Image (cartoon, grey):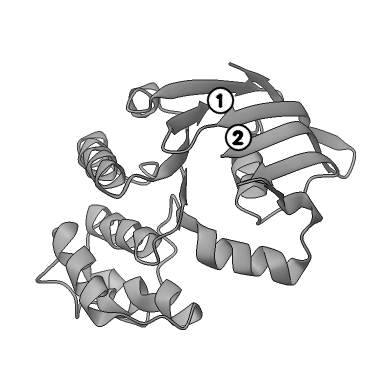
């Protein structure tokens, strides 16, 4: 489903990703592990169309997204990708319901029943009118997970999804992610520096100094 072929990425003179070749099968759950600065988040951003490589191909469902224009990448992100971030990236001045609705609004596909269904599924049925500042970190990440799933993306990309949580809450969030991706049959890539988080995946890929070790 996802194929990277000889991908290189630079930030100025810094060679972040070095000749990366990688395949992810449809429905597979993989984790990418490595130290801070190893290039793992950059790799995730390139797959998600948030960053561009200087060299190589990024093929998703037989389409080379490295050839996409900025507008095409925007549509790709909106329709094909669900993002989960370390710091949740919720909009602070709107409710849980409205935060989860955002991908549907951007795609002109609002579905209130689907939003309510996902709110219940992540265990926040009594919080739909709450604002992010009224929620715990674990609850905010549940909102972010529901938001990542609501527009039925094919791929879920999670960048340190438990990095802002204590270990017990992190385990609960990972158990929720695993349950939901199994139910919705998503292809999932998680970036983490925590070994116990990586163990939830079907396959672990290590990246060190911009080089992938499978």
Camera-side residue of 209 and 19: 19
**Disc number placed over residue 40 in the picture, else none:** 2
Q: Is residue 140 above or below residue 203?
A: below
**Disc number placed over residue 34 in the picture, else none:** 1
Camera-side residue of 29 and 145: 29
**Disc number placed over residue 165 in the picture, else none:** none
Q: Is residue 15 visible?
A: yes
* Quadrant in the picture for the C terminus: top right
Q: Is residue 11 above or below residue 6?
A: below
- The reply to whether the C-beta atoms of the residues labelled 2 and 1 are less than 8 Å apart is yes
Q: Is residue 27 above or below residue 201?
A: below
* Quadrant in the picture for the N terminus: top right
Residue at the image point whose x is 25% and y is 81% from the top? 112
Residue at the image point whose x is 22% and y is 38% from the top? 175
- Mark 2–mark 1 Cα distance, whole angstroms, equals 7 Å
Q: Judge the density around disc 1: few (<14), some (14-19), many (≥20) Cα neighbours within 10 Å.
A: many
Q: Give how far across and how far down residue 132 sits, in percent.
A: 30, 70
Say whether residue 157 is left or right of residue 140.
right
Camera-side residue of 133 and 49: 49
Q: Give how far across and how far down residue 201 sits, in percent.
A: 37, 28
Say whether residue 127 is left or right of residue 212.
left
Q: Give how far across and how far down residue 213 sits, in percent.
A: 62, 16
Please identify the residue farthest to the right as the structure is shown: 13
Q: Judge the density around disc 2: few (<14), some (14-19), many (≥20) Cα neighbours within 10 Å.
A: many
**Of callouts 2 and 1, which one flags the residue occurring earlier in the amino acid sequence?**
1
- Report helix, strand or loop for mark 2: helix
């Amino acid at each position: 489903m996802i194929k990277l072929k000889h991908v290189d990425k630079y930030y100025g003179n810094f060679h972040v990703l070095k000749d990366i070749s990688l395949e992810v099968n449809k429905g597979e759950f993989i984790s990418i592990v490595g130290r801070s600065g190893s290039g793992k988040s950059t790799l995730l951003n390139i797959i998600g169309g948030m960053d561009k490589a200087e060299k190589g191909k990024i093929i998703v469902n037989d389409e080379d997204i490295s050839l996409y224009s900025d507008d095409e990448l925007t549509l790709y992100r909106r329709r094909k990708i669900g993002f989960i971030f370390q710091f949740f990236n919720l909009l602070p001045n709107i409710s849980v319901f409205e935060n989860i609705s955002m991908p549907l609004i951007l795609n002109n596909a609002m579905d209130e029943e689907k939003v309510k269904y996902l709110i219940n599924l992540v265990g926040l049925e009594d919080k739909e009118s709450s604002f992010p500042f009224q929620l715990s970190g674990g609850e905010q990440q549940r909102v972010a997970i529901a938001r990542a799933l609501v527009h039925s993306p094919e791929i879920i990309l999670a960048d340190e999804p438990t990095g802002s949580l204590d270990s017990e809450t992190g385990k609960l969030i990972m158990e929720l992610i695993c349950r939901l991706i199994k139910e919705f049959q998503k292809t999932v890539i998680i970036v983490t520096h925590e070994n116990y988080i990586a163990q939830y995946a079907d396959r672990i890929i290590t990246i060190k100094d911009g080089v992938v070790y499978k």
